[in-house]
Image (tube, rainbow, N blue to C red):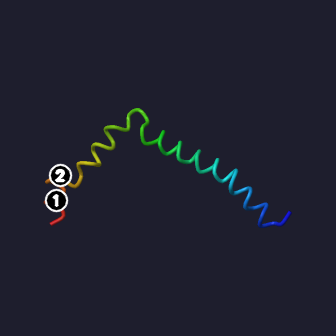
Amino acid sequence: MELYTYLRQMADSWGLLYMMLVFIGVVIFAFRPGSKEFYETHARIPLDEELKDHDK
């Protein structure tokens, strides 16, 4: 078997599994319990008047 063919098959099988596990990990991290307050706080940063006045 050629090296390219072997590497291509490994990327098709194990690469797909690796990328799926990374995606599931990111989704679990984003929707973990207790993260709602963190994301709401950071979502309000552009609208916070105190921070806007401080930058001027």
Q: Are marks 2 and 1 in contact (CB under 8 Å)?
A: yes
The foreground one among 46 and 4 is 4
Which quadrant, please, contains the C terminus?
Answer: bottom left
Residue 52 disc label: 1
In the picture provided, is 15 more to the left or to the right than 1? left
The foreground one among 5 and 22 is 5
Q: Which residue is mark 2?
A: 48
Q: Say which element carries label 2.
A: loop
In the picture provided, is 46 more to the left or to the right than 9? left
- Residue 53 image-quadrant placement: bottom left
Measuring from the top left, give residue 30's x and y in whole percent.
43, 42
Q: Say which element carries label 1.
A: helix
Which residue reaches farthest top? 33
Query: How many residues crowd around disc 1 within 10 Å: few (fewer than 14), some, or many (20 or more)?
Result: few
Residue located at (63% from left, 51% from top): 16
Residue located at (18% from left, 64% from top): 55
